[in-house]
Image (spheres, grey):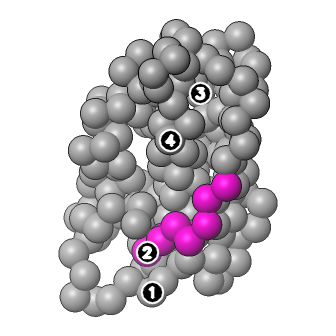
Amino acid sequence: MGEQRNVTFPQTTVDEYAALGVDLEALFSAGHLGTRMGVKIVEASADRVVGTMPVEGNTQPYGLLHGGASAVLAETLGSVGAMLHGGSKKLAVGVDLNCTHHRGARSGLVTGVATPLHRGRSTATYDIAISDEEGRRVCSARLTCMLRDLDPGTPADVPATA
């Protein structure tokens, strides 16, 4: 997800993953896609995940933020929340993403905030609000992730999104 030096994780989460030798910043990454799009996670817990993404470089032909870019930000933030909810023994796999685009953005940063709607044993659903720098809603999204048991043979660096 590009630079993530300002990510804040709950200490219990840091301790849980550190005991497993897992790098949280690498684990909760959107990989190459997030890096190319400039996604940065600035706060992360099962209760709230906040991230930013620049509009520049993520636009459609009319110069507006691409709806797919909003979807990438939404799925990344919701997946991070679902993984933190599931804990180190679960893998979050996105199964449903719904995005409603309310207004265009032409410049600056957009900020997404993911909060849980449902956190169960086998699924987690997050509401993601993406806003422009003036605080105006650009996109409303909802992501549901299936929480699968992590197989003992699965590497710990499996990404948070499917």
Residue 150 placement, left or right of 21: right
Quarter holding residue 3 = top left
Q: CA distance from mark 2 to mark 4?
A: 24 Å
Q: Which residue is mark 1?
A: 149
| Quadrant assignment for the N terminus | top left
Per the image, label 1 sits on a secondary structure element best described as strand
Query: Which span of residues is magenta-colored?
Result: 91-98
Rate crowding at label 4 as few (under 14), some (14 to 19) or many (20 or more) other CA atoms within 10 Å. few
Per the image, label 3 sits on a secondary structure element best described as strand
Residue type for callout 3: Thr
Q: Nearer the viewer, mark 1 or mark 3?
A: 3
**Magenta span main SS:** strand
What x and y, as percent, mark residue 65?
Answer: 53, 24
Please tell me which of labels 1 and 2 falls first in the chain.
2
Q: CA distance from mark 1 to mark 2?
A: 6 Å
Q: CA distance from mark 3 to mark 2?
A: 25 Å
Q: Residue at x 52, y 10 (%)?
A: 107
Q: Is residue 92 magenta?
A: yes
Per the image, label 2 sits on a secondary structure element best described as strand
Q: Residue at x 41, y 33 (%)?
A: 39
